Image: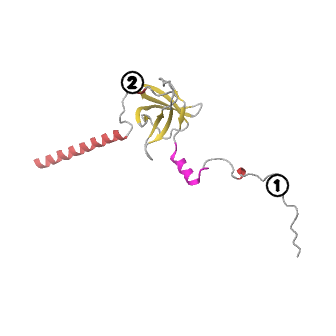
Amino acid sequence: MAQRQSFQIGTGLFILLGFAALGYLATQTSSLANYREGASYALKARFTNIGQLKLRAPVKVAGVRVGSVSGIQLEADKLDALVTLSLDKRFDKIPDDSAAAVFTSGLLGDQYVAIQPGGSPDMFKNGDEVVLTQSSMQLEELIGKYLVGGDAGKGGDKAAAKPEAKPDAKPDATPPNDKK
């Protein structure tokens, strides 16, 4: 009987340890990892398409996490996505002519905002807006362009793009005379 009870306790501890490991992996692979609120400042960026960007998605400079996405809303007048970035105060030396882009981690991974520093001597301040932005590239668009060709999604008639005949070229007016 005592042997059976110790077996049940061991099994229960093993299952509990398994759930703890799953919880740890879930927080490390999601955007909850490295999430902490300290002294920060906010930047805003407008994108025409943010893809699957989510709240608390990382904001990176040179591949290093410097903050997170703290807000996403639709601008009703321009129909753009207004993304609020919360950057750690330690990283307050980002030039104000920097560009922001939405990238994907890996082929099908989570999306994040990458900031490419500019060369301006002036730095971003709390509440500033990133003017240079690059929207998310959609996988479906890339596959469509690859399969259909480089002109996928472009309007226009290819026949209209052909050069016309030269107006100064004279057609041969005399029919050939085949007398035998």
Name the residue tied to disc 1.
169
- Inspect this view and state whether residue 81 appears: no
Callout 2: few (<14), some (14-19), or many (20+) C-alpha neighbours within 10 Å?
A: few
Looking at the rendered structure, which numbered label has been put on residue 39? Answer: 2
Give the extent of the magenta segment. 137-151
Helix or strand or loop: what does disc 1 sit on? loop
Count every numbered label the image shows and give the total: 2
Question: x, y (%) of residue 50?
Answer: 51, 38
- What's the amino acid at mark 1? Ala
Q: In this view, does 169 lie above or below 81?
A: below
Helix or strand or loop: what does disc 2 sit on? loop
Per the picture, the main secondary structure of the magenta-coloured stretch is: helix
Q: Coloring scheme of the render?
A: secondary structure
- What's the amino acid at mark 2? Ala
Magenta segment includes 142: yes
In this picture, residue 21 sits left or right of residue 174: left
Asked whether 174 or 151 is in front, the reply is 174
Q: Which residue lies furthest to the bottom in this view?
A: 180
| Mark 1 vs mark 2: in front | 1
Q: Distance between the residues labelled 1 and 2?
A: 75 Å
Question: x, y (%) of residue 11?
Answer: 20, 47
Asked whether 32 or 59 is in front, the reply is 59
Magenta segment includes 17: no
- Based on the displayed image, in which of its 4 quarters is residue 173 positioned? bottom right
Sooner in the amino-acid sequence: mark 1 or mark 2: 2
- Inspect this view and state whether residue 84 appears: yes
In this picture, residue 170 sits left or right of residue 156: right
- Residue at 52% x, 44% y: name it: 138
Tell me the quadrant of the picture where the C terminus can be found: bottom right
